[in-house]
Image: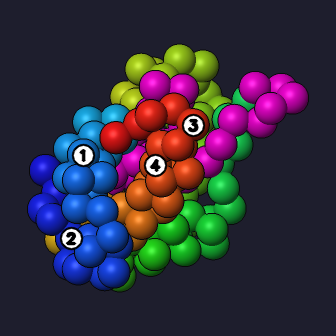
C-alpha cells in the first residue's frame, strides 16, 4: 500500500480528500509489480498505469508504441525500460488472446518488475491528477 506522498502543495489544500484518495486509489487501480491485464484486458503496470487503450471503433486493445511505453515507465520514476523483446511479448499477448485472464497468463511470463519505491513514485505522480478529478466532481456529485 502506498504511503502518504511528500507535501507537494496538494496536501495543504484538502487533507480529507487526500486521505480518501490514498485509500481509494490502490483499491480501484490495484497494485502489482509486474505487467498485468486490467479487467478490460489492457496491459497495465504498477498502480494502474495503462500501457495501451481500447480502440473505440473496433473495441480492440491497442498497445502504445515502444517509446511511449518506456516514457510512461520513466514518468513513474523508474530507470528501467522494456526491451524490444519484452515489448513484443506484450503486443503478442494482446493479439493472441481475447480474454483478460488469458492475456494475463502471457503477461506473467514477461520478466519485468517494479520495486516498491517505483510504485510509490507512480502513486505520487498519479495522486495530483486524481485529486484534480475529485475536486472537479465534488460539487456535482457530492463526492468526498
Q: CA distance from mark 4 to mark 1?
A: 10 Å
Mark closest to the chain's N terminus, 4 or 1: 1
Per the image, the residue denoted by label 3 is 140
Residue 20 has which mark? 1
Q: Residue at x 53, y 17 (%)?
A: 99
Note whether 42 is above or below 114 in the view shown: above
Alpha-carbon neighbours of circle 1 within 10 Å: few (<14), some, or many (≥20)? few
Residue 134 has which mark? 4
Task: Classify residue 90 as left or right of residue 3.
Answer: right
Per the image, the residue denoted by label 2 is 5
Q: Could you say whether the residue bearing mark 4 is in a helix, strand or loop?
A: helix
Q: Say whether residue 109 is visible.
A: no
Which of 3/77 is in front? Answer: 3
The magenta stretch is 35-59
Q: Report if the CB atoms under discs 3 and 2 are less than 8 Å apart.
A: no
User: x, y (%) of residue 46?
Assistant: 32, 53
Mark closest to the chain's N terminus, 2 or 4: 2
Amino acid at each position: 500500500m502506498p504511503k502518504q506522498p511528500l507535501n507537494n502543495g496538494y496536501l495543504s489544500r484538502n487533507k480529507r480528500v487526500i486521505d480518501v484518495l490514498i485509500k481509494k486509489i490502490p483499491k480501484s487501480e490495484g497494485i502489482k509489480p509486474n505487467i498485468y491485464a486490467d479487467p478490460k484486458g489492457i496491459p497495465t503496470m504498477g498502480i494502474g498505469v495503462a500501457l495501451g487503450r481500447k480502440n473505440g471503433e473496433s473495441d480492440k486493445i491497442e498497445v502504445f508504441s515502444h517509446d511511449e511505453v518506456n516514457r510512461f515507465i520513466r514518468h513513474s520514476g523508474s530507470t528501467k525500460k522494456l526491451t524490444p523483446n519484452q515489448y513484443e511479448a506484450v503486443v503478442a499477448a494482446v493479439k493472441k488472446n481475447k480474454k483478460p485472464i488469458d492475456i494475463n497468463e502471457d503477461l506473467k511470463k514477461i520478466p519485468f518488475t517494479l520495486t516498491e519505491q517505483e510504485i510509490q513514485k507512480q502513486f505520487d505522480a498519479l495522486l495530483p491528477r486524481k485529486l484534480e478529478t475529485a475536486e472537479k466532481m465534488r460539487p456535482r456529485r457530492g463526492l468526498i
